[in-house]
Image (spheres, rainbow, N blue to C red):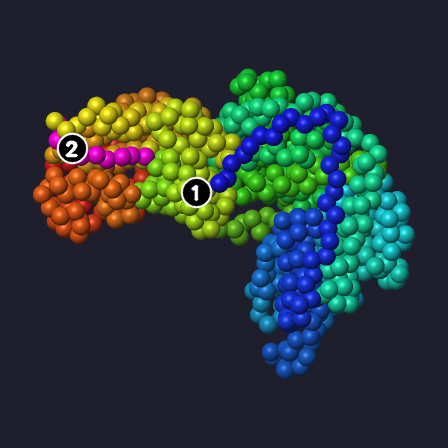
């Protein structure tokens, strides 16, 4: 199950964290069965799935292969190269752009100098082979202009540490003795491809070239040789840096102790920061207290290096110009946090004004992406959970780069104007404009109690289908983990978490909401659904039975609402938040032999009305969905409740019971968990933004339960 456990505080004298040293994972028994395009994919997947070799979404690979031209029937040379926006670790064959190599080489006739970089991108589609719809990336010229059959361009931490250090060029010479060349920083594009081609032509002995600020590019005559060349170069760099790091503490050594309460601190801090990040879209958060983050934020050189920002375009595009840093002694001061977030937005606006050009796109979201807290760790915010997690991982890569760069010289961040020109590149803006509109609930966080049951799981699925992240809370550990694992496969692991939580246990309830705050950043939607059901004549209703119903159905709803309240209240300025109680037809209509259950449901329904009054000034809407006879897919109906209700109606507990409820309804239809989920979805989202204190009956029609 996805959880966070806080390790014990680390010693201030801990040695610098070493760079991972990759090793070849090539399996010739697999490679021997593959076609040339499949070999390129195999090589790419091996490189991209090893995070010691390249970052997620980063790097590109290519092969120049012979293909039959579908128009002429002639054999032609085709460049297969990773397409725009792909990830070499997970891509398939359709992730490669395919282009006529002779047409790519002919493009130089249209190139007059660096000012033509953007223009040259527009010519790439004219070189497409076999109507391949995959767009070619900006790095295509780096592959097409080199004369080698197989080319890899990767940027792992150990390599970028060299590329982003004042001592990087000297270290490159020391490590490889002239086998690897060096080119100064140049933004990706056609000009960099020409510079690289000309450098290699003038230095035919080189086996690869270090691109300052970018990474490394290398080549070979076969797929396997190219892969093993890449891995070997990275291992060389990692071993060299590890030897340097062993000689002195990283970042000047530790200056701040690690907090043993950092997980709890993050859970309390993240919702307050999230509430301050107002804008067009809500944010999702990601917390990390990994060893790299703690070594950095607790170090003597932390503030100096953090202020410099990142060096690699891949890092920068996901983490912004610089992180927001916070004083751990002032985290409880809301005015301080508001001032810091506002100051960051002003800093970003000033950066935009200093660097913008006449045709720059409008300023984007000025809120911070990365928040660093000494003693606590790293927090990242973005429009969705996956992007927030990746931003954190990329800043972790940036930390590694700083550590290695400082071990051999001074860390060199990306020049501010260069950074701006990449962030606001018109080609990047065009890519952003082509992205589909986000789903309605992207950026929303929901907690669903009874999340392993029929209605709870159906509700969670409906919310996740439209983009929400969901914490499933349920007292059945095995069941809730099974549901979580299934949803992780269906919606992705970032969308769902699970917590073992008995809603009658105040401490477990508090822990579940703290977990949601730490994992996602806060809360927007509470679905109070955990329930039980019992049936007995009044004379047979024991105190234990009565209390059990009220503990779960009344007190449980109270405890979860109370715990959610401070998280929900903070979202007023971002459109408000929503609480949905799963009530019952029996909460508004009397039921035979169910006084404990029905009256407890009525108490919960009235609690919802009271909370609607309290919540309105804070933008918290509270509504109720009243189901009836949700038999199929329900865990409650699998036990004694089924037999008890059948007995109360004098009928068989098998199929006859389902038919009884179907025929009792006005519409003569079954009510399913998915029907309840649709009503919850309506009340949770913006389509019901002006509704609070309401009840929606989802019972196929029952005149006795008409609300009045």
- Can you see residue 689? no
Q: Nearer the viewer, residue 395 or 288?
A: 288
In the figure, is residue 554 to the left or right of 317? left
Circle nearer the viewer, 1 or 2: 2
| Total numbered labels | 2
Q: Do the residues labelled 1 and 2 touch (CB within 8 Å)?
A: no
Q: Position of residue 371 (x, y in %)?
A: 61, 30
Which label's residue is closer to the chain start, 1 or 2? 1
Give the residue at mark 1: 481
- In the rendered image, residue 265, in percent from the top left (x then y), is placed at 55, 24
Would you say 66 lies left or right of 274 here?
A: right
* Residue 176 pos. (x, y %): 87, 52
Kindly identify which residue carries mark 2. Answer: 536
Bounds of the magenta span?
A: 530-538
Magenta stretch secondary structure, dominant: loop
User: What residue is shown at x 26% (from left), y 37% (from top)?
Assistant: 625
- Secondary element at tag 2: loop
């Amino acid at each position: 199950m996805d959880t966070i456990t806080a390790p014990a505080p680390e010693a201030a004298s801990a040695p610098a964290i070493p760079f991972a040293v990759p090793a070849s994972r090539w399996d010739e028994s697999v490679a021997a069965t593959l076609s040339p395009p499949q070999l390129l994919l195999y090589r790419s997947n091996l490189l991209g799935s090893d995070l010691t070799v390249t970052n997620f979404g980063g790097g590109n690979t290519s092969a120049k292969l012979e293909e039959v031209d579908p128009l002429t029937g002639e054999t032609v040379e085709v460049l297969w190269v990773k397409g725009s926006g792909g990830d070499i670790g997970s891509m398939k064959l359709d992730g490669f752009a395919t282009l006529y190599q002779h047409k790519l080489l002919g493009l130089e006739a249209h190139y007059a100098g660096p000012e033509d970089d953007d223009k040259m991108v527009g010519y790439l589609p004219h070189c497409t082979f076999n109507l391949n719809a995959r767009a070619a990336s900006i790095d295509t010229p780096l592959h097409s202009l080199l004369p080698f059959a197989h080319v890899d361009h990767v940027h792992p931490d150990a390599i970028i540490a060299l590329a982003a250090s004042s001592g990087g060029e000297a270290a490159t010479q020391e490590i490889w003795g002239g086998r690897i060349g060096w080119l100064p920083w140049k933004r990706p594009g056609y000009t960099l491809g020409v510079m690289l081609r000309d450098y290699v032509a003038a230095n035919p002995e080189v086996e690869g070239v270090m691109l300052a600020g970018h990474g490394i590019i290398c080549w070979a005559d076969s797929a396997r040789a190219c892969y093993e060349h890449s891995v070997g170069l990275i291992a060389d760099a990692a071993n060299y840096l590890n030897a340097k790091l062993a000689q002195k503490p990283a970042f000047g050594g530790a200056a701040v102790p690690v907090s043993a309460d950092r997980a709890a601190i993050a859970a309390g801090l993240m919702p307050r920061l999230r509430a301050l990040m107002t804008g067009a879209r809500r944010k999702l958060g990601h917390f990390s207290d990994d060893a790299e983050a703690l070594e950095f934020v607790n170090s003597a050189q932390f503030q100096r290096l953090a202020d410099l920002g990142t060096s690699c375009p891949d890092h920068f595009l996901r983490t912004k110009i610089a992180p927001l840093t916070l004083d751990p002694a002032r985290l409880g001061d809301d005015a301080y946090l508001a001032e810091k977030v506002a100051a960051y937005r002003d800093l970003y606006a000033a950066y935009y004004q200093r660097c913008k050009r006449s045709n720059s796109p409008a300023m984007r979201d000025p809120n911070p992406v990365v928040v660093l807290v000494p003693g606590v760790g790293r927090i990242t915010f973005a429009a969705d959970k996956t992007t927030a997690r990746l931003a954190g991982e990329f800043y972790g890569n940036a930390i590694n780069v700083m550590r290695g760069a400082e071990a051999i010289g001074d860390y060199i961040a990306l020049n501010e104007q260069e950074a701006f020109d990449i962030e606001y590149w018109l080609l990047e803006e065009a890519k952003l404009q082509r992205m589909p509109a986000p789903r309605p609930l992207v950026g929303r966080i929901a907690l669903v109690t009874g999340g392993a049951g029929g209605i709870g799981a159906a509700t969670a699925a409906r919310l996740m289908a439209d983009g929400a992240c969901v914490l499933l809370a349920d007292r059945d550990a095995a069941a809730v983990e099974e549901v979580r694992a299934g949803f992780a496969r269906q919606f992705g692991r970032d969308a769902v978490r699970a917590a073992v939580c008995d809603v009658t246990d105040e401490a477990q309830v508090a822990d579940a909401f703290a977990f949601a705050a730490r994992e996602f950043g806060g809360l927007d939607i509470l679905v109070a659904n955990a329930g039980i059901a019992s049936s007995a004549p009044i004379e047979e209703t024991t105190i234990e039975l009565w209390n059990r119903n009220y503990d779960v159905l009344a007190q449980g709803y109270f405890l979860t609402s109370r715990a959610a309240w401070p998280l929900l209240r903070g979202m007023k300025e971002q459109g408000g938040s929503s609480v949905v109680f799963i009530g019952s037809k029996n909460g508004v209509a009397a039921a035979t032999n169910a006084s404990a259950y029905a009256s407890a449901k009525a108490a919960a329904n009235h609690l919802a009305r009271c909370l609607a009054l309290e919540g309105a000034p804070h933008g918290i809407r509270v509504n109720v969905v009243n189901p009836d006879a949700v038999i199929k897919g329900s865990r409650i109906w699998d036990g004694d409740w089924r037999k008890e209700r059948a007995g109360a109606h004098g009928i068989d507990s098998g199929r006859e019971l389902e038919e009884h409820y179907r025929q009792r309804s006005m519409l003569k239809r079954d009510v399913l968990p998915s029907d309840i989920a649709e009503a919850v979805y309506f009340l949770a989202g913006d389509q019901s933004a002006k509704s609070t204190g309401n009840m929606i009956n989802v019972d196929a029609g029952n005149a006795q339960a008409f609300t009045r």
